[in-house]
């Protein structure tokens, strides 16, 4: 359920939002904050700045801000997003004239998550109603409502499913101008070739590179998939420090956790990327300019999400990459997994050299958001398929893994209740490290009499034999903290 508090503009937004999400959308006055406790929605959007609140300030009469602050206070600790103040157009108050001071009014939501709806409409060329009708609600018609609904939809996806795990980027005609193999590559792309600092900056696809970096900062792993020779790629796709290196904007090989370079079908390359990172194809989003490549992927790997145009907006505001919580840098963890996945020799000797350390303990309140995330995402290392509601930390145990390449953090969670293991999940990022059975053993050691059973699901084949392995104790290559 999504709760929209603030009837004025949200009545228009509700219908397209229901169509996008397929869930119940309730609209009520912003004063009805008690509905949050009663309905327990997944997302709450609040419009404090309806016309009855804003109009006194527009005509110079300061109204009482107490009720607004009461609502903000009541929603502390909840996932609440506030609709930004729609300021009147400058022409309403005279060309470049001094409008009313609304800083104090806007300060009510300072430090909160705020949707800049007026900026969203402006980016899409939609004027607000006051352009045609004078000062009023400051809405942007049905098109504006549809845009706002798409933005709220992205927030809802971020809350219920989390962002995509991997963004896979094409290179030729996508991140660079033209082809990597072309003789004029350096001329078209001075950030990786020759040319001065200013030329490298202006000729870079700056907006796309900036957006990809922003996505990576939200915890999404970057992969490169290109039809090029790996040797040539390593030679040419490196930033020159005197060009764009100082600006830190141009991407190069070092920014990608996994690189697939070759001339086979792109769908097969995407399967290899998913296997090396230990994720499903449905965790990949592909950024590729080629209609042919996109069609081949759609036909042979339909689980992969194709990034829609315009790319920059999809990266910055789209549902696949929106993040509402703190972003974790998982790149070292995925690099560790990729290194283990590529090992073909003495695997146990290699794992022993990874200096793997596990730790398990009872969960605390601060662990619960990550526990919910694991329950929502994990499908392969899922022992029972159960999805109990995470109300508090009672009965939950959590497991942590680190090695010499990365601290993988909280990767495992199990719920012990009434003498049995209700659910147990472990992130697939550490599947190649072969620590899952050791984590399960360490948790069972704390609950020695608990009944532990595997319940088969469509996707948890990786847990076959896991219980039996856990009964043998911790693996030889694992140290228990």
Image: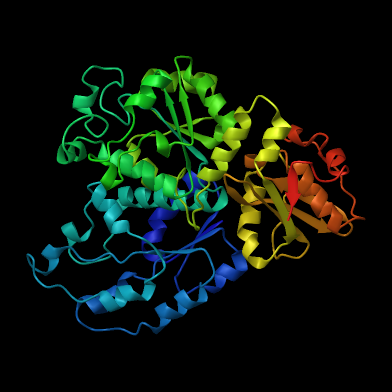
Q: Residue at x 70, y 57 (%)?
A: 389
The quadrant the C terminus occupies is bottom right
Residue 245 spot, x, y in % from top left = 28, 42
On screen, residue 192 above or below 72: above
Q: Would residue 292 appear left or right of 195 to someone viewing this image?
A: right
Q: How many marks?
A: 0
Rendered position, 460 above or below 28: above
Q: Is residue 391 or residue 338 the one in the foreground?
A: 338
Residue 424 sits above or below residue 87 on the image: above
In this rendering, does residue 308 appear at all?
yes
Q: Which residue: 63% across, 48% down?
A: 376
Image coordinates of residue 147 in percent, x first then y, are 35, 48
Quadrant assignment for the N terminus: bottom right
**Residue occupying the point 57% across, 61% down:** 41
The picture places residue 153, in percent across and down from the top left corner, at: 46, 49
Q: Nearer the viewer, residue 189 or 391?
A: 189
Between 478 and 73, which is closer to the camera in this rendering?
478
Residue extending farthest top: 264
């Amino acid at each position: 359920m999504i709760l929209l508090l603030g009837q004025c503009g949200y009545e228009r937004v509700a219908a397209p939002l229901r169509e996008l999400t397929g869930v119940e959308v309730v609209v009520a006055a912003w004063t009805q904050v008690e509905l949050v406790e009663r309905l327990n929605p997944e997302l709450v959007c609040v419009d404090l700045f309806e016309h009855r609140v804003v109009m006194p300030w527009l005509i110079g009469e300061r109204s009482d801000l107490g009720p607004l602050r009461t609502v903000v206070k009541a929603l502390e600790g909840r996932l609440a997003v506030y609709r930004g103040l729609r300021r009147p157009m400058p022409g309403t108050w005279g060309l470049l004239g001094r409008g009313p001071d609304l800083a104090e009014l806007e300060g009510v939501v300072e430090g909160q998550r705020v949707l800049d709806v007026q900026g969203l409409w402006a980016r899409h060329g939609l004027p607000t109603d006051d352009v045609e009708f004078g000062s009023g609600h400051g809405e942007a018609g049905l098109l504006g409502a549809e845009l706002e609904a798409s933005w709220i939809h992205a927030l809802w996806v971020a809350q219920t499913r989390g962002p995509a795990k991997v963004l896979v980027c094409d290179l030729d005609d996508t991140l660079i101008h033209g082809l990597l193999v072309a003789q004029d590559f350096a001329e078209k792309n001075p950030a990786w070739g020759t040319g001065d600092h200013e030329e490298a900056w202006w000729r870079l696809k700056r907006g796309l590179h900036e957006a990809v970096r922003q996505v990576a900062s939200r915890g999404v792993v970057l992969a490169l998939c290109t039809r090029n020779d790996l040797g040539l790629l390593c030679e040419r796709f490196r930033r020159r420090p005197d060009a764009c290196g100082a600006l830190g904007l141009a991407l190069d090989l070092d920014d990608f956790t996994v690189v697939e370079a070759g001339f086979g079908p792109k769908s097969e390359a995407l399967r290899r990327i998913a296997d090396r990172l230990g994720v499903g194809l449905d965790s990949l989003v592909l950024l590729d300019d080629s209609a042919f490549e996109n069609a081949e992927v759609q036909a042979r790997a339909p689980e992969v999400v194709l990034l829609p145009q315009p790319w920059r907006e999809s990266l910055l505001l789209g549902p696949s990459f929106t993040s509402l919580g703190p972003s974790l840098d998982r790149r070292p963890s995925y690099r560790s997994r990729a290194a283990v996945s590529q090992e073909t020799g003495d695997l146990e000797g290699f794992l022993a050299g990874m200096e793997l350390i596990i730790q398990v303990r009872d969960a605390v309140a601060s662990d619960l958001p990550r526990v919910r995330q694991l329950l929502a995402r994990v499908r392969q290392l899922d022992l029972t398929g159960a999805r109990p509601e995470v109300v508090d930390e009672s009965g939950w145990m959590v497991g942590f893994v680190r090695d010499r390449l990365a601290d993988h953090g909280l990767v495992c969670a199990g719920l012990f209740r009434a003498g049995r293991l209700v659910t147990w999940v472990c992130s697939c990022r550490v599947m190649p490290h072969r620590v899952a059975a050791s984590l399960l053993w360490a948790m069972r050691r704390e609950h020695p009499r608990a009944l532990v059973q595997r319940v088969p699901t469509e996707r948890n084949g990786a847990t076959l034999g896991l219980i039996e392995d856990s009964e043998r104790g911790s693996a030889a290559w694992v140290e228990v903290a």
